[in-house]
Amino acid sequence: MTPATTTTVPASTSSAELDAIAGRAADAAPRWAAQPPQDRARALVAAADALEENRAELVAIAIGETGLAEARLSGELTRTAVQLRLFADTIVDGAYLDVRIDEADPHFALGVRPDIRRYRIPVGPVLNFAASNFPFAFSVAGGDTAAALAAGNPVIVKAHSGHPKLSERTGAVVAAALEAAGAPAGTLQLIYGQEAGVELLTDARVAAGSFTGSIRAGRILADIAAARPAPIPFYGELGSVNPAFVTRAALAERADALADGYVASVSGSAGQLCTKPGFLFLPAGHGLDDTLAARAGAVAEHRLLNPGIAAGYRDRRTSILAAPGVTPIAEGSLRFDDAGQGWATPTIVRVRADDLAAQRDALLGEAFGPLSVVVEYDDEDELAARADDLFEGNLTGTVHAGAGEASAPLRSLIGWITGHAGRVLFDGWPTGVAVTPAMQHGGPWPATTNDSSTSVGTAAIDRFLRPVAYQDVPQALLPEPLQDANPWGVPQLRSAAGQSQAWGAAAR
Amino acid sequence: MTPATTTTVPASTSSAELDAIAGRAADAAPRWAAQPPQDRARALVAAADALEENRAELVAIAIGETGLAEARLSGELTRTAVQLRLFADTIVDGAYLDVRIDEADPHFALGVRPDIRRYRIPVGPVLNFAASNFPFAFSVAGGDTAAALAAGNPVIVKAHSGHPKLSERTGAVVAAALEAAGAPAGTLQLIYGQEAGVELLTDARVAAGSFTGSIRAGRILADIAAARPAPIPFYGELGSVNPAFVTRAALAERADALADGYVASVSGSAGQLCTKPGFLFLPAGHGLDDTLAARAGAVAEHRLLNPGIAAGYRDRRTSILAAPGVTPIAEGSLRFDDAGQGWATPTIVRVRADDLAAQRDALLGEAFGPLSVVVEYDDEDELAARADDLFEGNLTGTVHAGAGEASAPLRSLIGWITGHAGRVLFDGWPTGVAVTPAMQHGGPWPATTNDSSTSVGTAAIDRFLRPVAYQDVPQALLPEPLQDANPWGVPQLRSAAGQSQAWGAAAR
């Protein structure tokens, strides 16, 4: 394993370089957007293939820079390639363009209706701030990049400082594959440095931002995007504590399996996942302390991503362990090596629900690392109200119930999760997000800056498109997807003349 | 006609009242959201019917408060009822829920995939700031309200100070109709006063904002929404100057018709429309001065909406007439009556394109009222670059070309409009926005705060929904639209097991 400190760290991108990069992205934008979706899809598949062809080199660099395990990183590279192919599939038939054609209608309910045709066009260059904890899947060629490229936008990635060498190599591999497959130069570019990222976010040529990281950094960037002379959308995936709730019936059915699954979800990738369950509600008298302690004690020491994250984890862990009412179940460990890297084993603590409510400032924030809090409750009737009192928005909320259980408190709890999270899980654990058409990875603030969107799943493409309508434009001057001849063969949803006369009839 | 000053103006809503109103909206939210879309659709149709049943009274109040003509206001009431019925149709079959079901998949590309089901739920109470210039269609029961109600959200309307009595009556009529059709109390409520609107926009129970009005006010409100402890989406439709471009071929074919259409579009509703063409590019030597002057001179004097708008129009008109290089084609008139209301006839001026570029601060802002600027250009080659230099985002851009014309400059111009507006028009005028499935009423800043959305057309509902996914949730605990039994009979898009093995194949 190569210590991170020996890699060559690219210098922070200068203002002059940022100007040139934004210029190249702006030049590439109309040419990339003009490619038929089939051509862009081919380029995404080529990028996926190139990632897999360079697997050995890229994973080796990633191990050294992040401390994550080879199996995890190799799996993440596969996921990243699969994401690119999924977005190729998402665009290849053109359904994502959402083509709507209203035929001219002399009998329209509000007078003569012109011919109106609408579809979605790419927003323009997207600035994507990469994450620390997914050096492939939420980084240079990750989900945000794949979605923005698929939509037809050039992407500029602000590389994460935790894996600069990997970012550089991934960028070179993927940009070369895209260009070899016909993408214009400047379709994928990288920048380095926090200040460079902030500076580019205010550049008029940047049309949207995306981000995965902390609430603090995400809020700063979201505020910058909103305060621009011309504000732009900013899609940040920030902090989440992902509460999980276990009913008495579930505990009676499968206590050991619950302990196994919980500790695995808390400790996987050293707890450095957006969907780590930060709080597990167990009925008082659950009797799981010893089992949890044994499971946590069996987890091998794992390096944290970088010294900054390790220092943050140390502080959060110290204050949680010191909070009144908190009792360690598995105290775990944290040590720093000579290179300044932190190494940890899982810390599991317990607290009574009343004490958690009394210590909310000390306990409720996200602890990014392998730590989770068991919250002991008395009565299932109280769970929904407790959750409502304690938590803001989350990416996920999880329920473990007994077979066939469908009590009123359980329904209330599901209702609360639905109102405060993007994903409701049953009898599973929120880590390991499936990349699929129906996935929703987003939730009310502070889980994201914008809970109408997702950063995982095919709907993620919606963030990087905007609609334009054409009224009475001659066929020869219409974009291909809107022409009656439909040369790209995309789905066209037509509203025929005369339909408006019946509006409302179906609801009477 | 009743002068506006004699109507009873409701007092500004107090903080205590705002708290009670927000509380009622929050109470109504889950009950309104839980109604099957067929039931909500019926309530929307009932609201539409109630508006039309009270047409005589409502239009009479509106005439007095706005100075708009009876035909225009009666037509607008019809449009408002049609919008409500259109949204009833939009939701009645449940397609808007965008249900996606990924079946559990043991052979998924990234390991075993759970059962994931996603649909869109209402965001929660929406605060809608009503517009001055559409006292029905963008006001209490207007498009934003219809879209938010259809999505399943309670709506609180901040009534516009220009038509308070109409707002109150419309609110009473529509709220009663909704409640009689089964909507919970608090589904539609009104507040009064700018300060009350600002205060409520920061209330944690408000989940989204919508607005139609000036750039200045819209920016203030958008900034407030973005700066909340938990930011919320804010959909503002602000300012637009809607440039229109006439080629030499179009002028040669139909000069008189162009003059007729232009003056009608500029002067309709005294130019107080978001889509009024503020700039008309004509080739130098167009010879239309006399025709335009005659057409404008034939337009009857029209009252402006209220004294504040009249004062703003006076200032803009004065500075435009005084700008170097500006020559009146039709100087028009503006006078104030004893009640402080302004009355105007159209003002058309001309300026050479070079002079417009030199006087951009004086000339480029929106002039809300019956004033438009003819811009004389030399060469069609220059149009796209001129436009790019002069204009920010717009709701619309219009081209008048000759029959079959498809020159490179024309294509460049269409390309520029596509990149800077939400709607591209050919051989027509942008006023008179059709309410149809394919309409796009929105565009890059400052036309709107968010150009991925529209405030006219069925896609407007997207603003008030957010997705939630359910993972491995038992059938009995799933929301109706996600159940296999599908009791609401909504469209369900299924991804079958095994599909992921072929991802990317279609693009190779």
Image (cartoon, coloured by chain):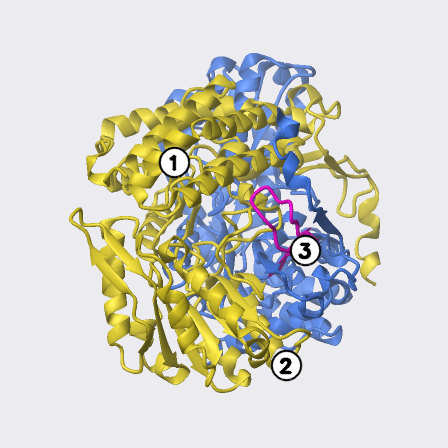
Chain colours: A blue, B yellow
Q: Report the chain holding disc 2.
A: B
What amino acid type should be assigned to the residue bearing mark 1?
Val
**Disc 3: which residue:** A97
Determine whether the residue tagged by mark 2 lies in a helix, strand or loop.
Answer: helix
- The residue singled out by tag 2 in the image is B408
Q: Nearer the viewer, mark 3 or mark 2?
A: 2
**Spot occupied by residue B168 in the image (x, y as percentages of width and height):** 33, 30
From the top left corner, tell me how far across and down residue A161 is, in percent. Answer: 50, 64
Identify the image quadrant of residue A366: top left
Tell whether position B115 is magenta.
no
Within 10 angstroms of label 2, few (less than 14), some, or many (20 or more) residues? few
Q: Quadrant of the C terminus of chain A?
A: top right
Q: Are marks 1 and 2 in contact (CB under 8 Å)?
A: no
In this rendered view, identify the residue nearer to me: A140 or A292. Answer: A140
User: Identity of the amino acid at label 2?
Assistant: Ala
Q: Chain of mark 1?
A: B
Q: Please provide the residue range marked out in magenta.
A: A96-121
On residue B59, which mark appears? 1
* Other residues around mark 1 within 10 Å, as few (<14) / some (14–19) / many (≥20): many
Residue B152 in sight: yes
Asked which secondary structure carries label 1, the reply is helix
| CA separation in Å, label 3 and label 2 | 26 Å
Where residue B123 appears, as percent x and y from the top left, is: 49, 35
